[in-house]
Amino acid sequence: MALKQALFLQLFFLLSACGSAEQEYIWKEKEVTVSAYNSTPAQTDRRPDIGAWGDTLKPGAKVVAVSRDLIELGLDYDTQVKIKGLDGIYRVRDKTHGRWRNTIDVYMGLDVARAKEWGRKRVKIKYRIKKDTIPNTN
């Protein structure tokens, strides 16, 4: 009986901790220009499989590159991102060239045809940030 109670208490505290951690985050929404890119030297540089933060990008990974102005809004390294029209949750693991603004590039591995098919479009995204890190935009 004591073992059951101990297990119940451990499970209760574990689930409570998970719930409170989730409450520390919110999903913000923003409309951005979304394009796609591939890990080819023609589209990136001589190390096309390495992201701006040093991550190795592998085909099939749900990764996005963000413009620097979006980093200032909270889309920093490893931020979770949902993109309208694409399934799943992506992670910020790369940056676009400094000339781009309000832009996200979706990593599509070596599938150049898929990236071209996606093209460039204005899309709503949602990104997950901690409540206490919301920048003041006034």
Image (cartoon, helix red, strand yellow):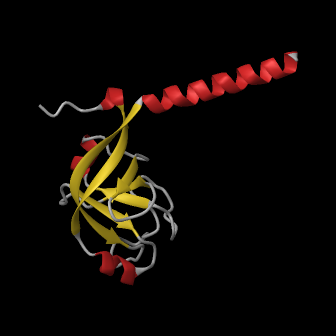
Pick the front one: 17 or 112: 17
| Residue 85 to residue 111: above or below | above
Q: Left or right? Give the position of 127 relative to 31.
A: right
Q: Position of residue 127 (x, y in %)?
A: 34, 46
Locate the N terminus by quadrant: top right
Q: Position of residue 59 (x, y in %)?
A: 51, 71
Locate the C terminus by quadrant: top left
| Residue 129 to residue 97: above or below | above
| Residue 83 to residue 11: above or below | below
Q: Position of residue 78 (x, y in %)?
A: 43, 47
Q: Position of residue 22 (x, y in %)?
A: 47, 33
Q: Looking at the image, which residue is at 51% across and 68% down?
A: 60
Q: Looking at the image, which residue is at 44% across and 29% down?
A: 23
Residue at far bottom of view: 113
Residue at far front of view: 1
Pick the front one: 131 or 39: 131
Q: Left or right? Give the position of 51 relative to 137.
A: right
Q: Left or right? Give the position of 117 relative to 109.
A: left
Q: Quadrant of residue 114?
A: bottom left
Q: How many labels sit on residues?
A: 0
Residue at far top of view: 2
Q: Looking at the image, which residue is at 64% across and 27% down?
A: 14
Q: Quadrant of residue 96?
A: bottom left
Pick the front one: 99 or 15: 15
